[in-house]
């Protein structure tokens, strides 16, 4: 065992967590069956304490195995939390069903609440389900108009991004940076699809003509009455653009 464990660079924790399948993968099945009646606990007791069937050593071994299991579980929890964390915050964990179910199961096993488990690993848990803080919509409006994201606004107001989004929809009909009335505006992607013109060219025309330009969480909005005539004039005057349209038979 000592030779095989050394060759495979196994730590004590790795060895403590070995099961029958682990011994098989290391090529130690024959030894396990012949010497230790096929029982990994006997093999591990002998490896660490050079005894077999010693009650005191078995008790120590069981404690060390439990400690190794907890350490491994902690490493998995840290990894799962890092996947969903935004800085030091964990927002609306229940929206990620896989991670939420796993942590809920672990928290129950450890007789803890999810927020207590999360905080144990150095994160701050924010859930819109338990949001009690009264937030002034005007604060959200002012911060968003300054260009702060929902996450940044949530951090400043001690809330969470989902709650901020819900309040924006409730009080403003959506992102405060979306111009109103929305039907008077058009996104870059819509312009590209409708007028067969690339993003870079559209933004060049916006800058050259100093047109209205609204950037939201997901889209950039331009005023139809301004940008569409400018694009039409560009397509009419630009010979290179006309050549491309003719080449690819685009009307």
Image: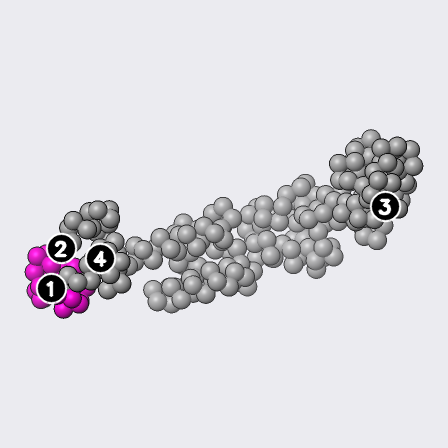
Quadrant of res 66: bottom left
Q: Earlier in the sequence, mark 1 or mark 2?
A: 1
* Dot 1 and dot 2 residues touching (CB under 8 Å): no
Q: Label 3's element?
A: loop
Q: Earlier in the sequence, mark 2 or mark 4?
A: 4
Q: For residue 27, which numbered disc appears in the image?
A: 4
Q: Which residue is mark 3?
A: 250
Separation of marks 1 and 2 at Cα, in angstroms: 16 Å
Q: Comparing marks 3 and 2, which lies closer to the viewer?
A: 3
Q: Label 1's element?
A: helix
Separation of marks 3 and 4 at Cα, in angstroms: 67 Å
Q: Comparing marks 1 and 4, which lies closer to the viewer?
A: 4
Q: Is residue 111 above or below residue 122?
A: below
Separation of marks 1 and 4 at Cα, in angstroms: 14 Å
Please report the bounds of the magenta region as a residue range: 33-60
Q: Earlier in the sequence, mark 3 or mark 2?
A: 2
Question: Viewed as shown, does residue 93 lie left or right of 40?
Answer: right
Q: Which residue is mark 1?
A: 35
């Amino acid at each position: 065992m000592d030779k095989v464990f050394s060759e495979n660079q196994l730590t004590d924790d790795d060895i403590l967590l070995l099961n029958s399948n682990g011994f098989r993968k290391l090529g130690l099945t024959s030894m396990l069956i012949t010497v230790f009646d096929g029982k990994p606990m006997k093999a591990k007791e002998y490896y660490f304490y050079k005894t077999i069937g010693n009650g005191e050593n078995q008790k120590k071994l069981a404690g060390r195995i439990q400690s190794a299991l907890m350490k491994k579980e902690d490493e998995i929890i840290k990894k799962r939390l890092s996947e969903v964390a935004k800085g030091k915050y964990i927002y609306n964990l229940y929206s990620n069903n896989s991670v939420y179910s796993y942590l809920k199961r672990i928290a129950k096993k450890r007789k803890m609440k999810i927020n207590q488990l999360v905080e144990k690993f150095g994160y701050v848990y924010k859930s819109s389900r338990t949001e009690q803080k009264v937030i002034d919509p005007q604060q959200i409006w002012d911060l968003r108009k300054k260009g702060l994201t929902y996450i940044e606004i949530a951090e400043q107001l001690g809330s969470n991004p989902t709650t901020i989004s819900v309040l924006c929809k409730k009080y403003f009909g959506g992102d405060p940076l979306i111009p109103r009335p929305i039907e008077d505006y058009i996104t870059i992607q819509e312009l590209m699809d409708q007028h067969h013109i690339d993003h870079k060219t559209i933004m060049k025309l916006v800058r050259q003509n100093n047109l209205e330009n609204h950037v939201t969480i997901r889209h950039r909005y331009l005023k139809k009455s301004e940008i569409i005539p400018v694009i039409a004039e560009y397509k009419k005057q630009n010979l290179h653009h006309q050549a491309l349209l003719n080449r690819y038979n685009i009307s």
